[in-house]
């Protein structure tokens, strides 16, 4: 059967997304549907694809896949905002990423995974805070310094929690 991946399909129609179910309970909901928005070559020959994943509550998850692995994701209140961000990413993948961006993570007692990272966007900076899943809490900043400071504060807090 030939499927059109531009229309919403069950997650299983996209093996690159289907394998993420074990890492993110939100994706395991049977009402989840995904659609491929675009697939293109980006900076330094990397292959990128952008997907919009929705559920019965109409929340939307924008997911950027780079070379077959999750590179970026963010939750949106609806699929229109996810599509707009996907359009922005189509341009951003052509730009060389900045090397000095802060990133860190660890595993807490009980196996909970956490991560903090700063993501450079076209007109803003984002701090992603992920705790025991793939979908991050995202805070937007207009200045790099503010994003870096917020990320450092989260990293310090998580490292102190890990020590206790």
Image (cartoon, rainbow, N blue to C red):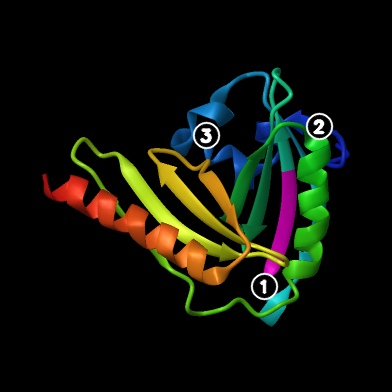
The answer to whether residue 31 shows anywhere in this view is yes
Q: What crowding class fits label 1: few (fewer than 14 Cα within 10 Å), some (14-19), or many (20 or more)?
A: few
Q: Is residue 157 left or right of residue 131?
A: left
Alpha-carbon distance for marks 3 and 1?
24 Å
Q: What element carries label 2?
A: loop
Residue range highlighted in magenta? 46-51
Q: What crowding class fits label 2: few (fewer than 14 Cα within 10 Å), some (14-19), or many (20 or more)?
A: some
Q: Decide which of 55, 118 is in the foreground and name it.
A: 118
Q: Name the residue under label 2.
A: 8
* Residue depicted at x 67% and y 25%: 32
User: Which one is earlier in the sequence, the residue at label 3 or at label 1?
Assistant: 3
Q: Mark 3 points at which residue?
A: 21
* Residue depicted at x 82% and y 45%: 83
Alpha-carbon distance for marks 2 and 1?
25 Å
- Residue 49 in magenta? yes
Q: Which mark is residue 46?
A: 1
Q: Is mark 1 on a helix, strand or loop?
A: loop
The answer to whether residue 39 shows anywhere in this view is no
């Amino acid at each position: 059967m030939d499927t059109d991946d531009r229309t919403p399909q069950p997650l299983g129609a996209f093996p690159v997304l289907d394998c993420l179910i074990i890492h993110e309970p939100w994706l395991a909901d049977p009402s989840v549907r995904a659609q491929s928005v675009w697939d293109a070559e980006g900076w330094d020959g990397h292959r990128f694809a952008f997907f919009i994943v929705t559920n019965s509550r109409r929340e939307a998850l924008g997911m950027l896949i780079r070379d077959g692995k999750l590179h970026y994701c963010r939750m949106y209140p609806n699929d229109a905002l996810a599509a707009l961000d996907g359009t922005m990413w189509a341009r951003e993948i052509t730009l060389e990423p900045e090397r000095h961006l802060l990133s860190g993570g660890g595993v807490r007692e009980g196996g909970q995974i956490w991560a903090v990272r700063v993501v450079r966007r076209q007109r803003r900076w984002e701090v992603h805070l992920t705790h025991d899943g793939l979908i991050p809490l995202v805070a937007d900043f207009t200045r790099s310094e503010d994003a870096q400071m917020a990320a450092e504060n989260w990293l310090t807090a998580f490292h102190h929690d890990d020590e206790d």
